[in-house]
Image: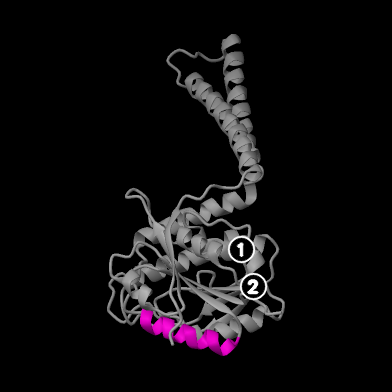
Amino acid sequence: MKNNNIFLSVVIPIRNESKNLPELHSRLLSVCKNIGKKYEIIYVENASTDNSLQVLKTLPEAKIVVMRWAPYMKRAQSLAMDAGFKQAKGDYIIYMDGDLQVDPEEIPRFIEKLEQGYDVVCGWRQKRKETLTPDLMLPIKAILRGTYTIFRKMLINEGVHDPGSALKAFRKETLQHIDLYGEMHRFIVALLHWRGFKIAEIKIKHHPRKYGHSNYTLAKGFKGFADLINVFIWRKYSDRPLHLFGVGGLFVFIFGCMGLSTLLVLRALNLMSLKDSIFPILFVLTIMTGLQLFLSGLLADSMSRLMYANPQSKPYSIKEIIETTQTD
């Protein structure tokens, strides 16, 4: 009986990569055919403003997931990745960028590592080649990236050198219960590490862009710091937010009560005049703040229980799925 199971799925989010696509797809087809097992190549078209979609439709043996975005929605890479992962049917899933800065020919090494018993394999770009053209912001970006890396290792160290690598491999089961949203694609390795999956890394080459330009900006760099704090707090308190807000609220509430009680005792003993004093107002505000924090913790705890009890609705929709045919 013929085995119709797909062995390998390659998932690639695409945004304004029309000039890279023909070479990328040709190399991918060569690699996948040499593996000798059933495969699928999935492109997630993520609101390109060039003719990337038209080019994708000309590629043989491609599955194209076209995202639908409302005008007010951000075209987030995390959502495009989530859509691609949800469509992937392979036992092994490769994620890579469409900018040709990493080599598709590395894929067999990643599969070999997965077959050694690892659940996730992350590429390690030791010598990153960001651009061939001069960029006056490169020194600032380098400083930001270095600072971000230090804080990341302190807060959510996932045990790899390059968690943001543009080439990763996963066993299918690792992604079955992962929902990506916001900027969570930055932390997918950390999320899987916390769930107990076995992670390895492989050194890979990194090339300058041939065409197009990087979407990395200083604004994204600062957002990365905010996401880092968010993920750190989420990791520690997502299943018990009352411990974060409630305990802090109780301390603030108790501090306010003790301060106000001390003032009242001193006033009763005529040791202190409260006339024109700002301290009673400050301690009352402290008590109210403590109560609000505690109630926020109770509300967050209830919402957390609902989140774990019900599957998350997807903040995106797929406009269409196109499957191109094989060439003769």
Report the number of discs.
Answer: 2
**Side (left or right) of 287 relative to 212:** right
Residue 248 visible in the snapshot: no
Can you give x and y, in whole percent of width and height, for residue 162 in the image? 53, 73
Residue under label 2, please give it.
91
Question: Which residues lie in the magenta part?
Answer: 21-36
Q: Which residue is mark 1?
A: 175
86, 161: nearer the viewer: 86
In the rendered image, which quarter is residue 301 located in?
Answer: top right
Q: Secondary structure at mark 2?
A: loop
* Above or below for 328 versus 74: below
Q: Residues within 10 Å of mark 1 (few under 14, many from 20)?
A: some
Percent position of residue 264, x then y: 58, 14
Quadrant of the rendered image containing residue 295: top right
Q: Earlier in the sequence, mark 2 or mark 1?
A: 2
Residue 59, label in figure: none
